[in-house]
Amino acid sequence: MELDVSVLTITDWYGIGLTGFLVLLALRRAIRIILRCICPPVLRRLGRRISQWAVRFLAYRGPFRRGSSVDIITWAHILIFLSYLTSNLSCIVIGAGDVAEACFRAGKLAFINLIVLYIGPCLDFIASVLRFRLRVQRRIHAGAGYVVAILSTIHAVGAFSRHGWSAVDQGHNLYATLALAGIYFILIPIRTFPSWIPYEMLLSIHYLVAGWLGFAMWRHIPTDSQFSLIFLYVVAGIFLGSLAWQVGETVYTNGWWFQSVSLSQNGSYDYIQVRMTLRKPVKVEPGQYINLWIPLGPLSGLQSHPFTVANWSIRAQTELKVFVGVKRGLTSKLRDAVKRGLKSNIGLYMGPYGATIAMKGYETILLVATGLGVVAVAPYLQGLVHATRAHEIRSTPETRSAPVHLIWHIPSWSRSLLPSFSSSVDRSCRAIACGF
């Protein structure tokens, strides 16, 4: 199959440009190093000033009142999303001969933007490869989903206005209708579903609907659309390549076999401690997490859940500890297994994922945690204790100790609420437990 470049339309060039942009985004660290070498100091200082201004006025500020449910949306999020949407709408209207052509372009652009959604099967893995924070990757994924929904709606409205209900009678249009319904279903926020539905079940439904969308899009594409078919193969190749990479990495990090898992609990079963003995040592940085898979039944065999690693070491670790707050789904099954006396099992893990925060170079460090959230700051505390003893961070002359403070807010003080990582708090740190 040969592609004639002379017949490429504006939407085709958008697809090529989007693919190139994603490649540059993946190589941004190497590009940054090259720019530092070739740019004069004046331009580097100007770039830092612009970056500081953008962080101060765009990344940390938003149009919504603090404390509201949408206060996490900043001006940077709004500007990036509007720029993304505007670029797609511009490709629809620029040079379009009539409304029918504009609606056709909208459908083609919706298909092209699927590359952002199907870049990999797991957001954690993609965020790790692209060196994004998971929160950023989730917003990119959600933003692309909203744009695809808007473009698909424009395409569907245009087809319905021309052909009416008779358009659904055609096989490829019927698949498009079902795909559009799937897009709308995926956009429903998880918080709107009943709280008794386990998160793992909702995530599995999300994956199933996403797989159905890919199949429906493939059936809807006309067979004579040469570029769309090539782009479909590109998207499928990227997805399958990412899936193979993730599976291969998981098998390798697990030492080509299952890990030994031991379970224990506190007196009131508020949380479950999971210890995983590794066949192959792994280096885990503070703040990183793993996706844990433990077979406890027919449904749990298809589920994995993210948990923050609670222990840290300067060397690669042969044992990982996580503390599981008991709620619903997999966590409740872990509690039931411990109550039945099943305290040993097998398991696999994926990761570690997530970014760590550099703690060196600060005069005072304040760690704040609520309840079992202290698990997330415990590795930082362990790392800071090690850095203090190794004289890698400064100490104050008055206290002769590292200026590290831990504030832990808990509903009431109980020894059962104090996990086994309490040994991390030593004389180098000041721990304040606040009960309310």
Image (cartoon, helix red, strand yellow):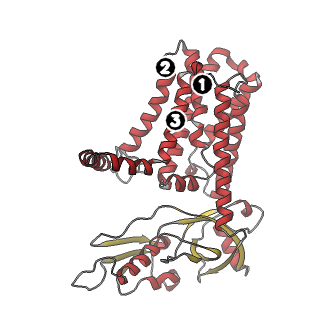
Which amino acid type corresponds to the residue marked 2 in the rendered image? Val
Q: Pointer 3 and pointer 1: residues touching (CB < 8 Å)?
A: no
Give residue 93's mark. 2
SS for dot 2: helix
Locate residue 428 relative to residue 413 in the image: left or right: left
Give the number of marks: 3
Which amino acid type corresponds to the residue marked 3 in the rendered image? Leu
Residue matched to label 1: 155
SS for dot 3: helix
Give residue 18's mark. 3
Quadrant of the image containing the N terminus = top right
Residue under the point 52% across and 50% down: 138
Real-space Cα separation, disc 3 to disc 1, in angstroms: 20 Å
237 up-or-down from 370: above or below: above
Q: Residues within 10 Å of mark 2 (few under 14, many from 20)?
A: some
Q: Is residue 270 visible?
A: no
120 up-or-down from 214: above or below: below
> Where in the figure is residue 198, as x and y percent of width and height?
65, 59
SS for dot 1: helix
Q: Mark 3 against mark 1, which lies toward the viewer?
A: 3
Q: Quadrant of residue 398?
A: bottom left
Q: Is residue 353 visible?
A: yes
Q: Quadrant of residue 58?
A: top left
Q: Residues within 10 Å of mark 3 (few under 14, many from 20)?
A: some
Which amino acid type corresponds to the residue marked 1 in the rendered image? His
Locate residue 225 relative to residue 190 in the image: left or right: right
Residue under the point 31% across and 80% down: 402
Quadrant of the image containing the C terminus = bottom left
Q: Pointer 3 and pointer 2: residues touching (CB < 8 Å)?
A: no
Q: Mark 3 against mark 2, which lies toward the viewer?
A: 3
Real-space Cα separation, disc 1 to disc 2, in angstroms: 13 Å
